[in-house]
Image: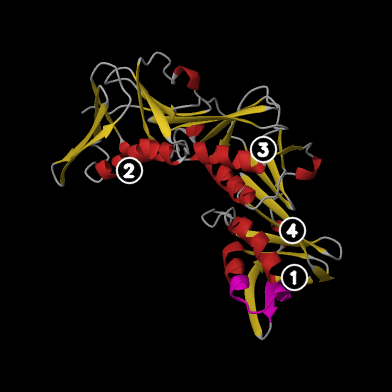
Amino acid sequence: MEFRIQKSEFLRGLRLAQGIADRRSTMPILANVLLRTDGKNKLLLAATDLNVSVSVELAAKIDKEGGLTVGARPLHDVVQSLPGEDVVFRRAENNWADIRAAKVAYKLVGMPDRDFPKMPDHREVKYSKVDPAVLREMIDKTLFSVSNDETRFHLNGVLLECDGARARMVSTDGHRLSKVERTLTGGPVLPQGVIIPRKGLTEMKRALEGAASPSEMAVAGIYVFVKTGEAALAVKIIEAQFPPYDKVIPTGNDKSLVVGRKELLEALRRASLMSSDTRGIKLAMEKGILHIASDNPELGEVREELEVEYAGEPLAIGFNPKYFEDILQQMTNEQVRLDLSGELDPGVIRPADGTDYLGVVMPMRI
């Protein structure tokens, strides 16, 4: 096996692969990237952790056909360090990789390509075209509230629902929930929602960041497929039941407060300097005023007032400020609305002039 490839082209594929290759696996080959020639002008580059897989077709001049697997991270770092614009890659004896550019020569340990796991076949899937910017935005607006608790695997991803024209994504970690709806013309028609795991979403977002419009998407069997240019990503769906999120979103909150998004975000950041994981912040509202306070016996205290639109009964409630900060950072509207009911009931925050995006935050005792 021997080929010549532009350094920038090689790095394009390796950047996608190294985030997926699993260096912690008990199977050493999962830390490797697969390199296999395809005709005289194409190189196939692939990586998998058995749940998330990527394959990329790269333009290359093939001098000798064949295949090899090499550690994804060391190969990326080596190629990135090379001088010049072209890289020559050759499989040497005992599956070593000989990598050269200008007067620099590296040798890396490799493994036979025949030992690489079989990848999901993205070529047999029927795709539809979608706007990559919309899909990327929906991932951004829900990824942060995915649960990190691996024992609650049904919460370790984002629920995707789609009727082919309108899509919805929902995530929750039990303390907060985020839900976004967008027009996604050409999206997959799903009879029921599918749960896409956190790592798969992170890699989908990475692939979509540089994607030209439109990209392609499909759900087939136990995989979600996304194609951007010459890169194809396959993400194994979490086979579990997502909780009935509609029952978590309050509908009877009778106290509404409207406030500037930026002003609230900055005030919460200041208050969080005096809070902790076990001690949240206190929001106390009365006509036209929101009082924000935080007390920490080991640090001190902070008090702040914001002018708001509020005409309801006085109410005081405690929250984890980070949960509000996370969702406010994903909004772009000038004003947001906070809907509340009682001091022990969850709050709902959304753009003041829209219903397509919202967050639900559970209260803390104060």
Marked residue nearer the N-terminal end (1 or 3): 1
Marked residue nearer the N-terminal end (2 or 4): 4
| Residue 111 in view of the camera | no
| Measured Cα–Cα span from mark 1 to mark 4 | 23 Å
| Amino acid at the residue labelled 2 | Glu
What kind of colouring is applied to the model shown? secondary structure
Marked residue nearer the N-terminal end (3 or 4): 4
Which residue matches tag 3?
224
Q: Secondary structure at mark 3?
A: strand
Q: Residue at x 68, y 26 (%)?
A: 190
Marked residue nearer the N-terminal end (2 or 1): 1
Which residue matches tag 2?
266
Q: Secondary structure at mark 2?
A: helix
Task: Looking at this view, name the residue that lies furthest to the bottom.
Answer: 103
Which residue matches tag 4?
114
Residue closest to the eye, 13 or 239? 13
Answer above or below: position of 106 versus 238: below
| Amino acid at the residue labelled 3 | Val
Q: Which region of the structure is painted magenta?
A: 78-101
Side of 247 where 339 appears, left or right: left
Mark number displayed over residue 81: none
